[in-house]
Amino acid sequence: MLGLELLLVALYGLCLVFILSFSLTQFQLTRLARRAYRQPAALPPPAPTEWPSVTVQLPIYNELYVVERVIDACARLQYPLPLLHLQVLDDSTDETVALAAERVAYHRAQGLRIDHVRRPTREGFKAGALRYGLEKTDGEFIAIFDADFIPEPDFLLRTIPHFQEGRTGVVQTRWGHLNEEYSLLTELQAFGLNAHFYVEQVGRTAGGYFINFNGTGGVWRRTCIEDAGGWQADTLTEDLDLSYRAQLRGWRFKYLPRVVAPAELPAAMDALKSQQFRWTKGAAETARKHLGRVLRSSASIGVKIHATFHLLNSSVFGAILLMAVLSVPLVYVRADLPALRPAFQMASVFLLAFVPLTYYYFTSWQLAAQDRNPTGPGFLLRFLLFLSVMMGLSLHNARAVALGLLGRQSAFIRTPKLGLVRRQGTWQGRRYRTGGLDGLTALEGLLALYFLSGLVAGVYFHDFGLFPFHLMLTLGYGLVFYYSLRHNSQR
């Protein structure tokens, strides 16, 4: 049996090494970001002598609650009117079509060049809609907003001047959160997204590493899209896919953390899970598609290392799940084989992997607090809750990663947008709710009990090395299971 115990420790150690390596790349990005924020703010580039033509694309699919809002917001964009073109790329199958048509007709009567674009089929989902719309416009630059976004009127005036360098292919802005205060679930999502937008994107830009267009809230140079091969629908993250194809072709991306595009966060667990599935599976699909090309490219070793962990970031969920499942029998192994205790000490070192992540998330917390006064729990409690919930989603997300790495195809299930702002509005009884209870939900509940047994075993054997880990796993899976049941009952 000794071989089995050593195998458990070895697998646990491999997972730990992967997570620690990922954490160290985030640590470096945090240092780069902090250094960038200490620099004096650069002056905005001068306005171009001649403004280029811009097309604003709004990919829509059954957005009954927000379609009018996003069309009206984009109609208020400040830009020379003859050079501005709005496309409502509407694949809807419900009353959204009539609502969109009414707003398009209204703004067209006001003198705005705006088209309501309908396709024969929904082939290629969002990527297909963007590709279809691009064929029907002559805009030199393409701004993209998902249906839940409300861009500020000066968005184009603040982004287009950054394209005066000829090889700049994308300008991405920071997402804001319209309904961060709505619930604990939305607060934790904002906490996680802020780390990406306040720290990771800034650090990647400062280090000269590959970054990604975030699917919305940004502007593309048309020739960049075309040179990189256009929008493709063979991954669920068409934005990450095109970002890597463009940067491998030598295009540069700019990130503007001080330009904010506010958007809605999913308020129900089923909506959050569908979004997480799309993001994690799509990232794995993109890694499968491009990681080899990145490693064979002429990019520097630093760029390759960061690109590797960028593309494999969703694989962290698989490592967390495997490490978590192995950690419970490790409690018994440590008790039964005291002679191997030195080898098992590594099982308790998992906390070291979270030290760099603490620095990463604390930095984003500080930066976000400068822009708004945070409410609710302080940093430490929110950080621990966030990590716990992410651990609780590891089964769901690890399955998505496995499907992506194996090349299994999935439909593009967009996240429902329900028009929630601050604490106003409700998602209960509204359309577009996704998913429901399934075997995976039941397994999440069983895993909460499984990790609770690890807590009990640790107390019984007076071995508290893994106690914090099992406590967070029990809490995380318990919360995910609870919210899944509660939100499903409130459909």
Image (tube, helix red, strand yellow):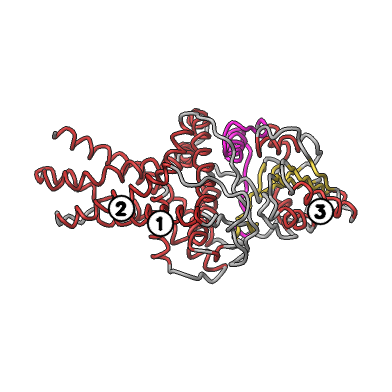
Q: Which residue is mark 3?
A: 103
Position of residue 169 relative to residue 295, above or below, is below
Q: Which residues are magenta?
A: 229-258
Q: Which residue is mark 2?
A: 352
N-term-proximal mark, 1 vs 3 = 3
- Residue at 76% across / 38% down in the picture? 133
- From the viewer's perspective, is the residue at label 2 or at label 1 nearer? 1
N-term-proximal mark, 2 vs 3 = 3
Alpha-carbon distance for marks 1 and 3? 41 Å
Q: Which residue is mark 1?
A: 479
Q: Which amino acid type is marked by label 1?
A: Leu
> Which quadrant holds residue 326?
top left
- Residue at 39% across / 51% down in the picture? 392
In the rendering, at what x and y percent does residue 164 appear? 73, 47
Secondary structure beneath label 2: helix
Name the one closer to the observer, 400 or 371.
400
Q: Along the horizontal axis of the image, is 89 left or right of 235?
A: right
Name the one closer to the observer, 407 or 283.
407
Question: Does residue 419 show up magenta in the picture?
Answer: no
Q: Along the horizontal axis of the image, is 96 left or right of 267?
A: right
Alpha-carbon distance for marks 2 and 1? 25 Å
Few, some or many C-alpha atoms within 10 Å of disc 3 (few <14, some 14-19, many ≥20)?
some
In the rendering, at what x and y percent does residue 341 appear? 14, 46
